[in-house]
């Protein structure tokens, strides 16, 4: 994630860049639960295309968050898991989930208190 001159800039920008995207947080969340093969991960994340999942996994791998382990078998078997660095994202995702849960609860309460006309 460094700039062309080799500097990194703002640490917030760097951190967000590592997990930026619609699917990366969901991928990380699933891999926090368990190591997954590609097809299993694809099934666990409804709506993501195989191409996008592949791209996002590669980016997470390049960022040192995900590790890919290819077994020397026929047919080929590949598993994805979080690196030690990737596991450090767990408290961040937990906080994001709490914010989302709070927001949903708040919206439901407001909708119940103010029924549509």
Image (cartoon, rainbow, N blue to C red):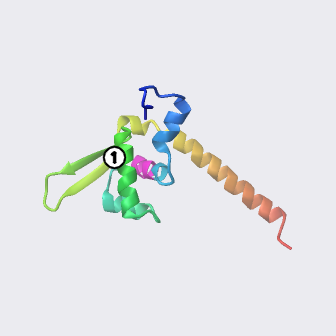
Q: Main secondary structure of the magenta part?
A: helix
Give the image location of residue 77, x and y in percent. Answer: 21, 57
Across and down, in percent, residue 43 comes to: 39, 64
Say few, some or many: other residues with alpha carbon within 10 Å of mark 1 (under 14 / 14 to 19 / 20 or more). Answer: many
Residue 81, percent from left and from top: 33, 46
Residue range corresponding to the magenta coloring: 27-33
| Residue 34 visible somewhere in the drawing | no
User: Residue at the spot x=61%, y=47% of the render?
Assistant: 98
Residue 77 falls left or right of residue 66: left
In the picture as drawn, the residue positioned furthest to the right comes out as 117
Residue at figure coordinates x 35%, y 41% from the top left? 62
Q: Mark 1 points at which residue?
A: 81
Residue 29 horizontal side relative to residue 37, left or right = right
Which residue is outermost to the bottom?
Answer: 117
Label 1: state its secondary structure: strand
Whether 73 is among the magenta residues is no
Q: Residue at x 33, y 50 (%)?
A: 35
Asked if 5 appears above or below 113 in the picture, the reply is: above
- Quadrant of the rendered image containing residue 82: top left
- The residue closer to the viewer here, 19 or 41, is 19
Q: Is residue 35 visible from the viewing direction of this image?
A: yes
In the visual, does 115 lie left or right of 34? Answer: right
**Relative depth, front residue between 65 and 107:** 65
Q: Please identify the quarter of the rendering in which residue 42 is found.
A: bottom left
């Amino acid at each position: 994630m460094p700039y062309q001159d080799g500097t990194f800039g703002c640490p917030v920008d760097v951190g967000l860049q590592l997990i930026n995207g619609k699917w990366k947080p969901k991928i990380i969340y699933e891999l926090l639960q368990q190591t997954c093969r590609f097809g299993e991960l694809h099934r666990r994340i409804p709506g993501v295309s195989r191409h996008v999942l592949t791209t996002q996994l590669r980016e997470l791998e390049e960022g040192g968050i995900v590790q890919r382990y290819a077994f020397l078998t026929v047919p080929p078997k590949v598993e994805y898991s979080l690196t030690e660095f990737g596991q450090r994202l767990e408290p961040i995702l937990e906080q994001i989930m709490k914010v989302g849960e709070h927001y949903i609860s708040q919206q439901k309460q407001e909708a119940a208190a103010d029924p549509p006309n």
